[in-house]
Image (cartoon, rainbow, N blue to C red):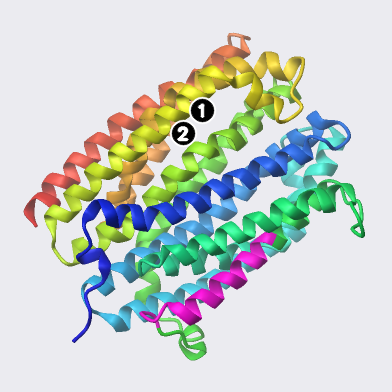
Amino acid sequence: MTKENKMGVMPVKKLIISMSLPMMISMLVQALYNVVDSIFVSRIGDHVSALTAVTLAFPMQNLMIALGSGTGVGINALLSRSLGEKRFDRSDAAANNGLLLTFFNFIIFLLIGIFYVRSFIASQTENPLIIEYGTTYLGIICCLSAGIFFQMTFERLLQSTGKTIYSMFSQATGAIINIIFDPLLIFGIGPFPELGVAGAAYATVLGQFVGASIGLFCNLKYNKEIIFSIKNILSPKVDIIKEIYFVGVPSILMMSIGSVMTYLMNLILSTFSDAATAVFGVYFKLQSFFFMPVFGLNNGLIPVLAYNYGAKRKKRIVDSLKFALVLALSIMLVGTITFLTIPEQLLGLFKASGQLLVIGVPALRTICLSFPLAGICIAMGSIFQAFSKSIYSLIISVGRQLVVLIPAAWLLAQTGVLNSVWWAFPIAELASLALSSYFFLKLYRGTVAKL
C-alpha cells in the first residue's frame, strides 16, 4: 500500500511552514547575496557606472530566471498533481523531460551570451565605461548559465515532492559560495586574481554550479518518489512537454514581462541621469529581502494546492490560502516600515552619497507603499499556477507592468520631476490587486467551491 504524501495529511499551518520556511530562508540568503554582489560592485572604480552596468544587465538576467523558473513551475505543477492522482508514470516523465528542457534553456542563453550581449547593453546607454562593464558581466553570466538552469530545475523537483529542506541546502550553499568568492575575485585577495566586474560574474556562476551539484545529489539520494533515467531524459514525450509548457509558458511570459518592464524603466530613467538608473537597480536589490521570502512562500504553497486539488480536498485548499495570505501581508508590511524609516542606511550599503541619496530616499519611501498590495497579489496568484490557470497570472502581470506601470512612469516623467516617476509603482499595484481579486474569485467560485 502506497503511503500518503504529507501534503495530503499534515495539519495545514504546519505543512505550509514546513514546505515554505526552507525556501523562504534560502531565498533570503539569495536576496542577501544579490545585495552583497552589488555592495562589492559599488566599490569598483566609478561606483555609479559599475552599479548602472549591473542594473542594465538585470533585464537579461531576469529573462534567464523567467525561462528556468517558468519551466520549473510547469514541471512542479504536473509532477505534484500526478503524485496526488497516484499517476507515478506521469510524475517520472515530468521530471525526466524537465531535465531535457533545462539543457535547451542553457543552449539558448549560451548563444545570447556569444552574439548579443554587447548590443543589448549598448541599447540602454552611450557611456563606454558602462557598456564595457555590462558586456563583461552579462557575457559571463549568459555563457555559463548551465549552473543556474539546472540548479532551478533540481530545486523544483525537490519542492514538488515536499522535500524543501534539501532545496534550501542547494540554494543557500550556492549563495554562500557567491558571497565568499565575490570579494576574493573582484579585488584579488590572496592567491586570486583581481578581476573587477568579471569577478562578480564568476563568483555568481560558481555559486550556481555548486548549488546545481548539491541539487543533483539530493535528488538522486533522497527523492525516491521520482525515478531518473538517462534513457527517459533523452526520449522526449510530446504530451508531457505540452502539459509542462501549458502551465509554464504563461509563467515564463509573466516573468519575462518583468524584463521588458525593467528595460523600459531603464530607458525612462536614463533621460534623467545614470544615478537615477543606479538607484532603480539598488531598489531592486533591496526589495528582494521582502519579495524573495514571499515568493518562497508562494513556491511552497503551489505543490500543496496542486496536490490537494488532485486529491479533491477543498478544506485544505481554503485553509492553506488563508494562512498564506496572512503571512504574505505580514512580511510585506515589515518591508514597508523598513523602507519608510531607514532609507538612508539602506542606500549607504552601496556607498550612496550626494545625488544617489537625494534621488534614492524619496524613491524607496514612495515605492514601498506598494509592498502590502503586492504581497496579497502574490499569495492569491499561487492558486492560478497550482490549478493550471497561469494565464490569469499572465494577464495580471501584463496589466500591472506594461498597461499601467510603464505608461504611468512615462507620463510622470514628462513632468520633468524624477520623484513623481516612482508613484507609478503604487498606482500599478492597485491595478494588480483589482485584477487579482477578480480572477481569484472567478476561479474559487468556478472550481474550489465545487470540489
Distance between mark 2 and mark 1 Cα atoms: 6 Å
Tell me if 355 is positioned left or right of 45 in this view. left
Amino acid type at circle 1 is: Ile
Give the overall secondary structure of the magenta segment: helix
Instruction: Please name the residue that numbered disc 2 is placed on.
Output: 401
Task: Confirm whether the magenta stretch covers residue 211.
Answer: yes
**Crowd rating for badge 1 (residues with CA inside 10 Å; few <14, some 14–19, many 20+):** many
When asked about the image quadrant of residue 82, the answer is bottom left
Q: Which residue is mark 1?
A: 406
**As drawn, 402 above or below 65:** above
Residue 169 against residue 402 in the figure, above or below: below
Q: Which of 287/385 is in front? A: 287
**Which mark is first along the chain, 1 or 2?**
2
Residue at image location 78% in from the left, 40% down from the top: 41
Q: Is residue 115 magenta?
A: no
Of 395 and 306, nearer the camera is: 306
| Residue type for callout 2 | Gln
* Residue sitting nearer the eye, 353 or 266: 353
> Magenta part of the protein: which range?
207-226
Mark 1 and mark 2 in contact (Cβ < 8 Å)? yes
Residue displayed at 37% across by 70% down? 242
Q: Secondary structure at mark 1?
A: helix
